[in-house]
Image (tube, helix red, strand yellow):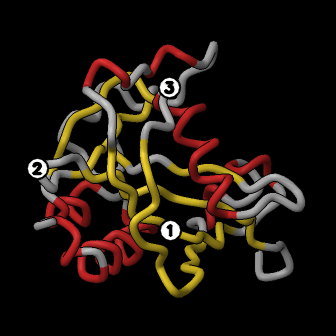
């Protein structure tokens, strides 16, 4: 496993005007309403030679149907997670051991009607809701929990804005 590289990825902590964060339910886990890992933040791969700031807006448009957002903060570090052994060789096209992620906090400038999970012909998510930032770690799948804990702590000052 350690011989496989990390996949470069961006993630979005999208805050609404009330300081709540957009979380989305994975379409491949529709019965995981309260289970850790059923809900997550929008994220996605970075194309070759793509700027991470550009990638995060592209990913929002692809995954939630809108890019009506502005970057308000960038996490200073690339955060990594390793896939559990049973997913290595299966998840992420079988080519990666996990992901190296650049996370951004963004302010949503649209309305709830602008969020369109059906904008992509193969949607990654089938439901969405606004959540308190402090809820993120409890929603995360085990192998991503440390990242969600870090995001909840490091972006906490933005939730009140």
In the foreground, 109 or 48: 109
In the rendered image, residue 90, in percent from the top left (x then y), is placed at 72, 48
The span from disc 3 to disc 2 (Cα, nearest Å) is 21 Å
In the rendered image, residue 161, in percent from the top left (x then y), is placed at 15, 65
* Residue lying at 50% horizontally and 37% vertically, measured from the top left: 67
Q: Of the residues under marks 1 and 3, which one precedes in the sequence?
A: 3
| Residue 16 relative to residue 108: left or right | left
The span from disc 1 to disc 3 (Cα, nearest Å) is 19 Å
**Label 3–label 2 contact, CB within 8 A:** no
Q: Of the residues under marks 1 and 2, which one precedes in the sequence?
A: 2
Mark 2 crowdedness (10 Å alpha carbons): few <14, some 14-19, many ≥20: few
The local secondary structure at tag 3 comes to loop
- The residue under label 1 is 103
In the foreground, 142 or 158: 158
Q: Of the residues under marks 3 and 2, which one precedes in the sequence?
A: 2
Taking 105 as reference, is 29 above or below it? above
In the rendered image, residue 16, in percent from the top left (x then y), is placed at 22, 47
Which quadrant of the figure has residue 62? Answer: top right
Taking 84 as reference, is 3 above or below it? below
* Residue lying at 25% horizontally and 73% vertically, measured from the top left: 152
- The residue under label 3 is 65
- The residue under label 2 is 18
| Residue 74 relative to residue 50: left or right | left
In the foreground, 60 or 137: 60
The local secondary structure at tag 1 comes to strand
């Amino acid at each position: 496993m350690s011989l496989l590289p990390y996949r470069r990825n961006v993630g979005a902590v999208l805050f609404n005007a009330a300081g709540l964060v957009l979380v989305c339910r994975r379409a491949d886990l529709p019965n995981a309403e309260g289970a850790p890992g059923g809900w997550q933040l929008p994220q996605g791969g970075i194309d070759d030679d793509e700027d991470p700031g550009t990638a995060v807006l592209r990913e929002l448009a692809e995954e939630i149907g809108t890019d009506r957002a502005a970057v308000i903060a960038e996490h200073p570090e690339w955060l990594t997670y390793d896939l559990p052994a049973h997913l290595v060789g299966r998840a992420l096209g079988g080519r990666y051991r996990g992901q190296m992620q650049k996370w951004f906090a963004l302010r949503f400038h649209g309305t709830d009607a602008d969020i369109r999970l059906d904008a992509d012909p193969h949607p990654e998510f089938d439901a969405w809701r606004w959540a308190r930032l402090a809820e993120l770690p409890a929603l995360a799948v085990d192998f991503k929990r440390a990242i969600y804990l870090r995001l909840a702590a490091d972006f906490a000052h933005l939730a009140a804005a």
